[in-house]
Amino acid sequence: FVLLIVYMTALTAFIVVLMAPTFVRVVNRTADTHTVANPQAEFRLSLTFMMACLLSCGLFVFCCFHMYLLAMNYTTIEFLEKRGCNPPPNHVNLYGLGVWRNVAAVMGSNPLVWCLPVRWTVRGDGLSFPINPNLEQTQKHSRDDARSDKITRCRA
């Protein structure tokens, strides 16, 4: 899915770049002569260019969001459960292994084949995943903090 979004973002950006000189030429010609040679063709060109620009911008934002999810090793549902980019202070990502290992867990261990839609270097069966090694340590600290807060509130 991530590759599809990346490919579509690149394709729409490519279309915008290819159409831009033609669009600029038509707009400049219309501005210079104050006449429209072929209004239907110019309308179609303008509409197509504007739609490609909007689609490209929307896909770029969508691609950036999914790159963030990939880097943090979240699914969309997990992201929504933690309520956005500012997780609660005691939140620990169960599957967060660090950016490089998160990307390698999804795309494979060899960066040369990341652009190919293949699973040649992806480890695992897709049903079990490595757990964050700092999870137990972080949970212990949060339990200790909760106990000390409880003791502090009881003394007050």
Image (cartoon, helix red, strand yellow):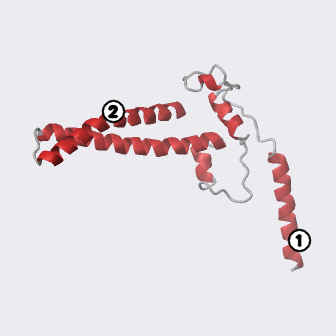
Residue at image mark 1:
151
Q: Going by the image, does 84 lie left or right of 142?
A: left
Q: Name the residue: 83% across, 47% down.
A: 136
Q: Amino acid at mark 1?
A: Ile
Q: Name which quarter of the figure residue 106 lies in.
A: top right
- The picture quadrant where one finds residue 71 is top right
Side of 99 relative to 83 (left or right):
right
Residue marked by disc 2: 18
Residue 80, percent from left and from top: 58, 51
Quadrant where the image shows the C terminus: bottom right
Q: Residues within 10 Å of mark 2 (few under 14, many from 20)?
A: few
Q: Position of residue 4 (x, y in %)?
A: 48, 31
Give coordinates of residue 10: x percent, y percent: 44, 33
Element at badge 1?
A: helix
Q: Tell me whether circle 2 and circle 1 mark residues in contact (CB < 8 Å).
A: no
The local crowd at label 1, few if under 14, some if 14 to 19, many if 20 or more residues have their Cα within 10 Å, is few
Q: Disc 2 to disc 1, how far (Cα)?
A: 66 Å
